[in-house]
Every structure is written in C-alpha cells, then in structure tokens.
Amino acid sequence: MGLPSTGNSTSPAKAQRAEPIERFATELGLKAVGATEDLVGALARGDEVVWEGFARKAGKWMYIWSSKVYRHKSDQEDIAQQALLKVYVDIPRQVGQMPAPCNLYRYLQRITVNEALMKLRGDRDRINEPIDNFDPEETSPNAEEALGNAQESCRKEALIRACLTRLMFENPNAATIIYLRYFVHLPYDQIVSETGIEIKSAYHYCCEGLARLRELLRRPGGAK
C-alpha cells in the first residue's frame, strides 16, 4: 500500500529550476551521498586529475552561463576561464560549505555570472570614461561629509546587489536586464543587442524583476 500524500508536492516552477541541477549532478558524478563534499575536498587539495575532469565538465556549464549574460562569443570562453581561475583560488575556503550538488552549482553560477557582468561593465566604462575632465589633485572641502555619504551609498548598493544576486537564481533574465539598465546604464536598444532578448521581453523582465527586488528590499535583512 502506498504512503499517504503529504500535500507538499513539488511545484512546476520549482521542478523546472531543479532540472538543470539534476543534469549538473549527473554529469559531474555527484549523485552519491557525500560526493560533492569529496569533490570539493579534492579540488581544494589541488588534485590534478580531479581538476582536469572538473574543468572539462564544469567548464561547459560556466560557458553556457557566461553566454546568457555576455553575447559576444569571442569573449565567452575567456569569461568562463577567468571564472574557473577564481574558483581555483577560492575553493579551499569552501570545504565543508557544500554538502549537496545544488550548493556547488549555485556557487559556480554566481562566480561566472559576476565575471560576465564585470566584463560588460568594464567595456562600458572604457567607452565612457571622462579622462579629459579628471583632475587627480582635486579634493573636496567637505571630505568627512562626503565620506559619510559614500559609506551610506555603499551600504545601500551592497543591499541591492545582494537582492539582485538572489534574483539571479530566481529569474536570470530579469536580473541581467536590471543590472545592465540601472548599474551599467545601457539603453534598451543596446541591452537587446548585448543579450539577444527581444525588446518587449526586456521590458517585461525589467518590470517583473523590479517588482521582485522591491519585495526583497522590504524584507528585514534584504535577500536573507
């Protein structure tokens, strides 16, 4: 006789989010209990054989993630490689922090997406940097007040970025559109060019993402 239903069946949206993680776990051989912790431990020790297999298999996923944010194919592989290098440096700090494949999946996704967004912002800054008006000797007469304002601004921006990172896991397209529009200050026509998302969809993702960000920001602790 079958067990009675608990009434907590997985929603279609949650099942859809879990599907890539299931494929990720299968491809990297992480289905067994403790396999993720064993892999992270081997990577932290610098096991060359494990790293070779990990770079080949996880690198494919990192390339896919970079391509969803940065449209130019010539740089997508470089972004994935740079993200993999950051993982190599940081992974020893993650020992004991990743008990399941989903933890490793989201960790790699976050590093890759951040690297792609930094690349986009760097491209934008190099184009618009006002070098002719820059005066390295100029100082503010109200330095303490300016510093206080800057610290408060940084605190608010850090909270927004934390919520944006949460949104990236829930709705990557919306988070990407919002970042490009409000952090990199790209016009919609350039966002469409960079991401390949149609203009109507870009507007929709932006509105949807902003509504979710407001909801997250109203919570105590923001994205926690």
Image (spheres, grey):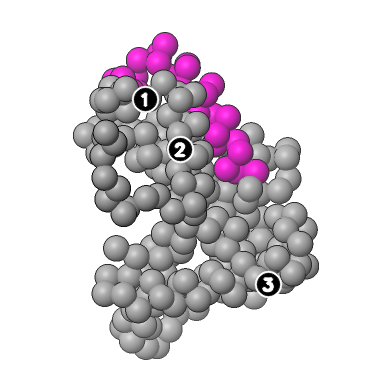
| Residue 117 in the image, given as x and y percentages of width and height | 56, 54
Tag 2, which secondary structure?
Answer: helix
Give the vertical position of 136 relative to 44 (above or below).
below
| Residue 38 in the image, given as x and y percentages of width and height | 28, 22
Residue occupying the point 62% across, 51% down: 69
Foreground pick, 198 / 134: 198
- Magenta-drawn segment: 39-67
Residue at the farthest top position: 49
Instruction: Quadrant for residue 76, please give it.
Output: top right
Q: Which of marks 2 and 3 is nearer the N terminus?
A: 2
Whether the residues at callouts 3 and 1 have beta carbons within 8 Å, the answer is no
Q: Which mark is residue 21?
A: 2
Q: Mark 3 points at which residue?
A: 203
Whether the residues at callouts 1 and 2 have beta carbons within 8 Å, the answer is no
Q: Can residue 146 be seen in this view?
A: yes
- C-alpha separation, residue under disc 3 versus residue under disc 1: 39 Å
Main SS, magenta region, reads: helix
Residue occupying the point 49% across, 54% down: 13
Tag 3, which secondary structure?
Answer: helix
Q: Earlier in the sequence, mark 1 or mark 2?
A: 2
Q: How crowded is mark 1: few (under 14 residues within 10 Å), some or many (20 or more)?
A: some
Amino acid carrying mark 3 in the image: Tyr
Residue occupying the point 41% across, 59% down: 166
Whether the residues at callouts 2 and 3 have beta carbons within 8 Å, the answer is no
**Closer to the camera: disc 2 or disc 3?**
2
Q: Which mark is residue 31?
A: 1
